[in-house]
Image (tube, rainbow, N blue to C red):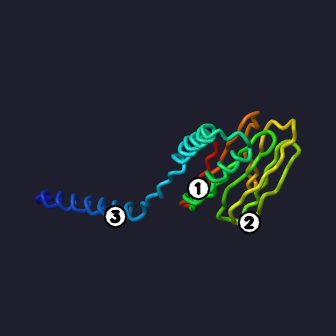
Amino acid sequence: MIRMFNKKGQFYLIVAIVLATVMVGLTTILNYSRTEPNIKIYDLKEEIQLESRNVFDYGLNQRYTSEVQFNALLINFTHDYINYHKDKDLYFVFGNKNNITISGRQKTDKLVSISAGSSQKTITNRTEEITGSIDPEETAEKITLNIDDLQYNFLLNNGKNFYFVVSQKTGGGEYIISG
């Protein structure tokens, strides 16, 4: 006849093996877990929209009536953003039906061009701070900003226009916002 031994020792042995397995599993999971960098690019979209409205209000309150004055104001505004956000590629497109300006900076070599109707201009294909402009075709209804193989279309309104594209490479991916 088989004699039954005290099963209390067997129970503790099984519990110890299960606990050791769980601890090894958690250690393995924790060693492979990594936190992604904090991406604040989506907050930047709202910030740029708010700040650009304030810049337009400032220009109107200062009674800037000429496009030259407004363009100078917006170029200063965009350069401030470029200098503050050095970890991102920033492209600002602004102007009216008579003249469209692009101002920005890119950290890597990308082909940047802008078009409105049949008017088209290549701005740059190098890493640098960029500024350029085109005179849109009279019947143009949209502005197209090309950055390498990506195309961004914006409406060309009768009044003042202000648009932006911001991209940030982080954690093996590229995050892009436009507005």
Query: In the shown orientation, is residue 19 left or right of residue 43?
Result: left
Question: Who's the residue at 68% across and 51% down the image?
Answer: 72
Q: CA distance from mark 3 to mark 1?
A: 46 Å
Query: In the shown orientation, is residue 102 left or right of residue 20?
Result: right
Query: In the shown orientation, is residue 120 left or right of residue 94?
Result: right
Question: Who's the residue at 83% across and 54% down the image?
Answer: 121
Residue type at mark 3?
Answer: Thr
Residue type at mark 1?
Answer: Asp
Task: Please state the horizontal and vertical placement of residue 117, each as a whole percent of the image.
Answer: 86, 42
Which of the marked residues, 2 or 3, is nearer the chain's N terminus? 3
Residue type at mark 2?
Answer: Arg
Q: Nearer the viewer, mark 2 or mark 1?
A: 1
Residue 89 sits in quarter: bottom right
SS at circle 3: helix
SS at circle 1: helix
Q: Which mark is residue 58?
A: none
Mark 1 Cα shell of 10 Å, populated few (<14), some (14-19), many (≥20): few
Which of the marked residues, 3 or 1, is nearer the chain's N terminus? 3
- Circle 3 residue: 27
Question: Who's the residue at 22% across and 59% down the image?
Answer: 14
Mark 2 Cα shell of 10 Å, populated few (<14), some (14-19), many (≥20): some
Q: CA distance from mark 2 to mark 3?
A: 46 Å
- Circle 2 residue: 126
Q: Nearer the viewer, mark 3 or mark 1?
A: 1
Task: Please state the horizontal and vertical placement of residue 133, each as a whole percent of the image.
Answer: 78, 52
Near-viewer residue (173 or 112): 112
Question: Who's the residue at 63% across and 41% down the image?
Answer: 59
Q: Which mark is residue 80?
A: 1
Q: CA distance from mark 2 to mark 1?
A: 21 Å
Quadrant the N terminus occupies: bottom left
